[in-house]
Amino acid sequence: MARQNYFDKGDHFSEFHRKFDGLAYVDCDAIEICQQCSQPLCVMETCFDKGQTFKTTTVTEKIATALNVPGYLVFYRLGKDEQIDRFRVTKLVPEKSREYFLKPMDFVKILQRLQQQHVCGVPF
């Protein structure tokens, strides 16, 4: 976590945590989980798409690897109606992919596939 917040004031915990040397944390943007057993299915670093070409994903990759689930970098763009109209997605873990441009429902299909492929330990 950066010592200085360059864009805006963070939440209360973030501002508290920044006061102390020797501490470091990142917020966890998104973890897709099984609806039944809450098992993590993937870890996502999300970012509002302003046309940037890079975002640090080191911790996201480490968490995904430790959980043995896919890790993704997900940029999202808003349309004129203030709804997400496009995603730019890069798979980070287990193997890095090229960046894909996806319509919202195509991104949903990726998440649905993770749900469907999961072998849940909770009986229905």
Image (cartoon, grey):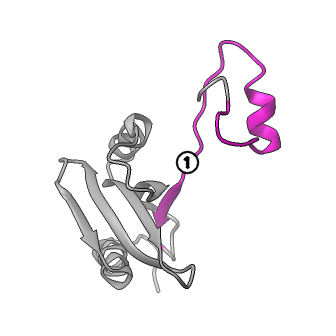
Image coords of residue 79 (percent x, y): 48, 79
* Predominant SS of the magenta segment: loop
Residue 52 in the image: state x and y as whole percent.
Answer: 38, 49
From what the image shows, is residue 98 above or below residue 85?
A: above
Magenta segment includes 21: yes
Q: Under tag 1, what secondary structure?
A: loop
Residue in front for this viewpoint, 77 or 57: 77
- Tell me what residue is drawn at x 40 percent, y 59 percent: 75
Residue 117 horizontal/vertical position (percent): 28, 74
Q: Which residues are magenta?
A: 5-34
* Closer-to-camera residue (22/82): 82
Q: Amino acid at mark 1?
A: Cys
Q: Is residue 104 left or right of residue 91?
A: right
Is residue 8 positioned above or below 42 on the image?
A: above
Crowding at mark 1 (Cα within 10 Å: few <14, some 14-19, many 20+): few
Q: Is residue 114 above or below residue 80?
A: above
Q: Residue at x 37, y 40 (%)?
A: 66
The residue tagged 1 is 28
- The quadrant the N terminus occupies is top right
